[in-house]
Amino acid sequence: MTSEKQSTPENNILNAAKEIFQKKGMAAARMQEIADEAGINKAMLHYYYRSKELLFEAVFKSAFSMIAPQLNEIMNADTTIFEKIKNFSSNYIAFVIKHPYLPNFIIQELNRNPEFVKNLIADKNFPNISKFKQQVNEKVAEGAIRSITAEQLFINIMSLNIFPFIGAPLLKGFLNFDDEAYKKLLDKRKTEVADFIINAIKL
Amino acid sequence: MTSEKQSTPENNILNAAKEIFQKKGMAAARMQEIADEAGINKAMLHYYYRSKELLFEAVFKSAFSMIAPQLNEIMNADTTIFEKIKNFSSNYIAFVIKHPYLPNFIIQELNRNPEFVKNLIADKNFPNISKFKQQVNEKVAEGAIRSITAEQLFINIMSLNIFPFIGAPLLKGFLNFDDEAYKKLLDKRKTEVADFIINAIKL
DNA sequence: ACATTTGTCAACCATTTGGTTAAACTAAAT
DNA sequence: ATTTAGTTTAACCAAATGGTTGACAAATGT
C-alpha cells in the first residue's frame, strides 16, 4: 500500500528504461524509444539522468537490487540446507515468471562488462553465502549428505533455477514446446528442482 | 591436417566477425572493428557479405553448427542414459572451455530474436532428443531410475553444463573466486556434473 | 505582484554508422 | 599487348543517434 512506488518523473523514466533496456540490452536500446515509452521528450531523459550510460547504471542497479536481497535472505536464514534449497527454488522461479527479462538482462550485461561486478560487490546487500557454505561443510563432515563442495552445490542450485529462463528460446526449440507448454513445465519446476537437488545429495 | 579451414577472404572475414560478434553481440559490434580485426577495408565486408545482418547470420549459423552436431551425436548414440549424461558433460565442458564466448552469444541472440530458432529447426542437423526421451521413459517405467520426465531431466542436464559459463561473472562474484580458481572449478565439473545428475535419478 | 527556480519541449548539432561508388590494382585468358 | 574478371581501396553519403540549446511554461519563494 504505502510501499507502492511513487509516480515521480524519475520513476516513470526508470520504469520505461527498464522495459527497453531489459528487452534489448544497452547497445540496442534507443533513447528515443525510452522517451516514447515514458511518454516524454527525449531531452527529459538527459535532464533527469545526464547520459545513456548513467540511466543504464540506474536501471541495472535497480534490477540487481530486486534479486540480491532475496538470495541473501534465504541463504542466511536460520533454516536447514534442504529448506534453503526448497525456498530458493520456489521463490526464485515464482519471481522470475513475473519478471522474465530480468535474469537474462543481468547476465548479459555482466558478460559485456565483467568488471562491473566489482561495483556491485561493494554494495552492502551483495549476497553473502558464507553461512550456506558452513552448513554444507558441516553436513558433509557429519556424513549427512554426499560429499560435495559448497561452491559446486551453489552453482548447481543457481544453474537449475536460472538457466531454464535464460535458455528458454533454445530449450523450447530442442523440446519442441510452445509457450504454453513451456510455461507449465517451468511452473512444475518450483518443486521439482528442489527435489532433484535434494535427491542428488541425500544419502 | 587436410581438414584445416582454408584461409580464403571469406573465411578470414568470418573468423574476425565471429570474434567481434561473439564478444560484443550484434548491436554493439561495429563493421569497422570487424574490418580492422580482419586486416582489410570495410568495403570488403560488404563485397563478400552484403550487409551486417547477413554477415551476422553467417556467424550465427557457423557458431550454432559447432554445438548442435555434438549434442545430436551424443543423444542419439547407442549408449545408456548414464553414459550419455557422462559423455555430454565432459565433452561439452571441455569444448566450451576452448570457446568461452559461444554459449552466451547463442543464448543472447536467441533471446533478442526468438523467432530465429524456427530458422534453425529447419536445418537437418538440428538436435533431436527423441531417442533420449524414449530411453528415459523406459527406465522410469522399469523402475530403474526415479520418476522424472525426459524434458525436465534434459533441461537439468543443459542447465548444469551451460549456466556455469554464461553466469561466470556473476558466480565468480558470489563465490569470491578469481579467474584461476573458477577455471579449476569448471574443470572439476567435467565429472562432477554427471555424478550429481546420476545421483539425483539413481535409485 | 514579482523574481527565481524548476520542468518541458521543438529544433538543432556533431558524430557515428552501415552502406555505396567509382576508380585503381592484379592476374589470368585471349 | 589487351581484354576481362575479380579484388581492393579511399572518399563519400544518408540516416540514425546521443546529446545540447534556447525559448517558454509552471511552480515556488518573498
Image (cartoon, coloured by chain):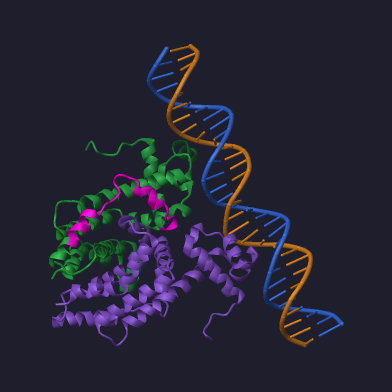
Chain colours: A purple, B green, C blue, D orange
Is B30 included in the stretch rendered in magenta?
Answer: no
The residue shown at (29%, 81%) is A84
Task: Specify the quadrant of the image occupied by residue B151.
Answer: bottom left
| Residue range highlighted in magenta | B111-137
> Is residue B176 in view?
no
Quarter holding residue D11: top right
Q: Nearer the viewer, residue B62 or B19?
A: B62
**Which one is nearer the viewer's eye here, B175 or A108?**
A108
Tell whether B16 sits left or right of A59.
left
Magenta stretch: includes residue B135 = yes
Residue C29's spot in the image, x, y percent?
39, 16
B24 in relation to C2, above or below: above
Q: Is residue A122 left or right of residue B73?
A: right
Image coords of residue B74 (percent x, y): 20, 52
Q: In the figure, A42 relative to B38: above or below?
A: below
* Figure label count: 0
> Compared to A45, does C28 lie above or below?
above
**Apparent side of residue A8 relative to residue B167 in the rendered image (left or right):** right
**Which of the image's four quarters has the N terminus of chain B?**
top left
Residue A42 in view in this figure: yes
For the residue pair B203 and B55, the one nearer the viewer reads as: B203
Q: What is the x, y in percent for residue B66?
A: 29, 48
* Closer-to-camera residue (D28/A15): A15
For this orientation, the residue located farthest to the front is B141
Give percent across and percent down for residue A48: 61, 71
